[in-house]
Image: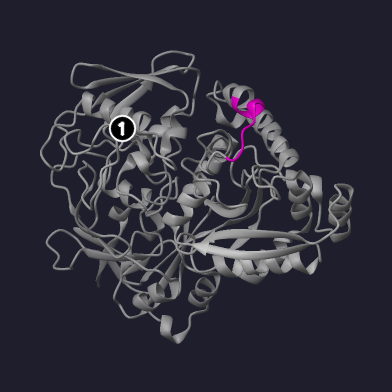
Amino acid sequence: MFYRASLQAAAALASLSLVAGCSALSGSGSDVDQHISVGTTSSPSTLDPAGAWDNSWELMRNVFQTLVSFPTGSTKPQPDAAECVFTDSTSMAYRCELKSGLKFSDGETLDAEAVKYSIDRILAIKAKGGPLGLLGSLDRVETKGDDLVIFHLKKSDATFPFVLATPAMSIVAPKQYPKDKLRTGNAVTGSGPYVLDHYEPHTVAELKKNDSYKGFANRKNDSVTIRYYAKSDEMVEALRADKIDATYRGLTADEVIGLQSGKKEDKGLQLVESVGADIRFLVFNPKDPVAGKPAVREAIARLVDRDALVAKVYQGTAEPLYSIVPKGIAAHTTSFFDTFGDPDPKKAREVLTDAGITEPVEMTFWYTTDRYGSSTAPEFEEIKRQLEKSGLFKITLRSAPWTAFQEGFNKGQYPVFGRGWFPDFPDPDNFIAPFVGKESATGGMYVNKKITDQLLPSSRKESDRGAVSKQFAEAQQIMVQDIPLLPLWQGKLYIAAGEDIGGGERALDPQTVMQMWELYRKASW
């Protein structure tokens, strides 16, 4: 099926070695130090899963456990803390039986009540920008004894196992996490592959093996240090200086191309490329007096030149995106191109004039400085240049660190802002549902009942996820008509590492979340 093939493609990674080396995985008894140091520009915004619907998942996947998970190479959720199955043909009751002997890192027993507690607190806290929107189909969580959990759904939802596989559904220790508010501080109590031994926000996370872990992860190292960098050039310099062993998230196009070219300073490094499903788009605030005008949004849609944007800023490490559902995912279309075609300043002017807008439109565009890498600022400079070149717009650019930026758009403070999306799971549902509705990942900017009340429920009755193209094609066309957001590009993911580091080709799972346990240091022959 096409859906299964797309999942396999998303999980497949091709290693592009810049140098050749003769090495092997260190075996039992080897004196090779299996401590790995990894750098990233993507630091967590929270350590509490009930508040996380962003790249905080990168750390959470490694220190928490979920009932089911996505091991590299899997095409559907696999057992982690539990064996799970739908108990009915309508996909409305999902039953999970926990493994025996599960414990949290503080020694507390991980039982059915802990699972129920973890999910119920997401529903109770309703954290702004949190994962509540993923649980729209959940009615209630039932427990039977210590090891049985049953999720009763309000409606058919064949994607529910995919939701449970996200780090947002991590199981937390009830005694350590308040039921009605997010946990504060820099500690984590989970049951994942690693224990968070030390954490300094935006600086470093120290992970060590969790001796009581019982799950699918085969840990190929003993401990991991994650270092967080404000700028990607600092991260790359740290890699070249052997201060870190590998990078993930945040390499700019120039840095990727530089690593591919085999410069002298990059001798001894390798680059691993992943098929990407990550996307970038603009979000329009419908309550803003300017961005709320349909003609303004359509004019922008008719002016943005995606080909020029990805050529100038991303240089082959991204490609134009003409739908919110990217290539490689079932139900992908090119609806924005089909409707608006190539950039057309003349048509954009006609659209504004017909709406009575004859003066250049003044707008403020916002972006985050520390979430999507150093290319974000040049990207917005290019968008500003394109819009202003038409003579139809005058754009002011503003930026903020992710935590403040997220708070700002959730409060509706920004007329237009840039948003990135790494999929929760590789299904078209996850590229539509998160952006529609009052609890959406874009601050509840866009509500459309045809999508939320008809098309999504209809698609979720279909267990064959390759057979939902009709519903999602219609949903994408509705979003073209309303233009609540404007897709810009989809990218590729890269891991840069020293030649002595193995496992990079397996480190990104089908959700494009980093599995630190796959990395290891090779022993020289």
Residue occupied by mark 1: 67
Q: Taking 209 as reference, is 173 above or below it?
A: above
Please tell me whether residue 446 belongs to the stretch shown in magenta: yes
- Residue at the image point whose x is 56% and y is 68% from the top: 377
On the image, the x and y values in percent for residue 341 come to 81, 52
Left or right of 334? Residue 59 is left
On the image, the x and y values in percent for residue 284 come to 64, 48
Q: Secondary structure at mark 1?
A: loop
Residue 12 visible: no
Q: Nearer the viewer, residue 449 or 524?
A: 449
Identify the image quadrant of the N terminus: top right
On the image, the x and y values in percent for residue 100 come to 16, 28
On the image, the x and y values in percent for residue 38 come to 32, 65
- Residue at the image point whose x is 47% and y is 51% from the top: 406
Under mark 1, the amino acid is Leu
Magenta-highlighted residues: 445-452
Left or right of 308? Residue 62 is left
Q: How is the image coloured?
A: one colour
The image quarter containing residue 280 is bottom right
Please tell me whether residue 75 belongs to the stretch shown in magenta: no
Q: Nearer the viewer, residue 140 or 221?
A: 140
Residue 93 visible: yes
Q: Residues within 10 Å of mark 1 (few under 14, many from 20)?
A: many
Give the number of callouts. 1
Identify the image quadrant of the C terminus: bottom left
- Residue at the image point whose x is 59% and y is 54% from the top: 417
